[in-house]
Amino acid sequence: MSSLSKENAERAAQHLLAAAFFVDTDPRRAHLHGVAASARAGRVGRVREVAGYAAYHAREFEIAIRELRAANRITGDGSMWPVLADSERGIGRPQKAIEMAKDPQVKLLDIDGQIEMKIVVAGARRDLKQTEAAVATLKCAELENETASWAPRLRYAYADALEANGDHKNAQKWFVKSAEIDINQETDANERIKSN
């Protein structure tokens, strides 16, 4: 933020810190801080990125798209691509999310980003009632991973897709596999197991 005045940079930084602080507990408040930071430092890529993530968590998907696209243009960083694609789903454009998965940016993502993109694309397939394609999207060697931060969510998404596709037996198996490694309770796999 070196191109900003000292006062403006400090105020923008305060808003960014507040956005990061509130994003999990009060997404609406985080979003408002993101908007304020972006208004003060709209030419700074990381500011636009934080504002975009805050908007996404507040389910303000159109704003998230605008902010994250701007951040991507400014920084060239494609790590936000899965959130951008999921925001397209959020405004009712699942086909656009699927098209985004074919973009060259996706090949540059690290393994975390690649898995997130798979989960988003599977969700988009589900939105389009393409349940078999959703299962195929998530069927990968990474399902056997037990330690990565994304592993419980990948297994959960796979189980959910199997269930939507009518394969209740295998869905139950994968809900159990998700619950076994979901130490932070990121999913409701345990509830899904009980309800089946």
Image (cartoon, rainbow, N blue to C red):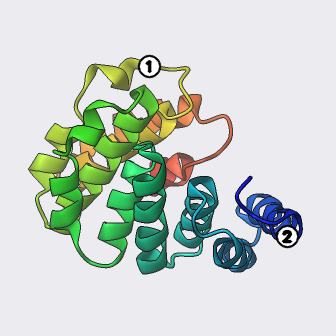
Q: In this view, does 19 lie to the left or right of 90?
A: right
Q: Is residue 38 left or right of residue 153?
A: right
Q: In this view, does 92 lie above or below 46?
A: below
Q: Is residue 151 left or right of residue 82?
A: right
Asked whether residue 170 appears in the rendered view, the answer is no
Say which quadrant the N terminus sits in.
Answer: bottom right
Q: Quadrant of residue 97?
A: bottom left
Q: Residue at x 74, y 52 (%)?
A: 2
Residue denoted by label 2: 11
Counting from the top left corner in percent of width and height, residue 20 is at 75, 58
Secondary-structure class at tag 1: loop
The amino acid sitting under disc 1 is Asn
Q: Which residue is drawn at 48% across and 48% down?
A: 75
Nearest the camera: 164 or 152? 152
In the rendered structure, which disc, 1 or 2, sits on the residue that comes first in sequence? 2
The amino acid sitting under disc 2 is Arg
Q: In this view, does 43 lie to the left or right of 39?
A: left
Counting from the top left corner in percent of width and height, residue 38 is at 64, 72
Asked whether residue 103 appears in the rendered view, the answer is yes
Q: Residue at x 28, y 39 (%)?
A: 106
- Dot 1 and dot 2 residues touching (CB under 8 Å): no
Counting from the top left corner in percent of width and height, residue 157 is at 36, 46
Q: Is residue 91 above or below residue 151?
A: below
Residue denoted by label 1: 145
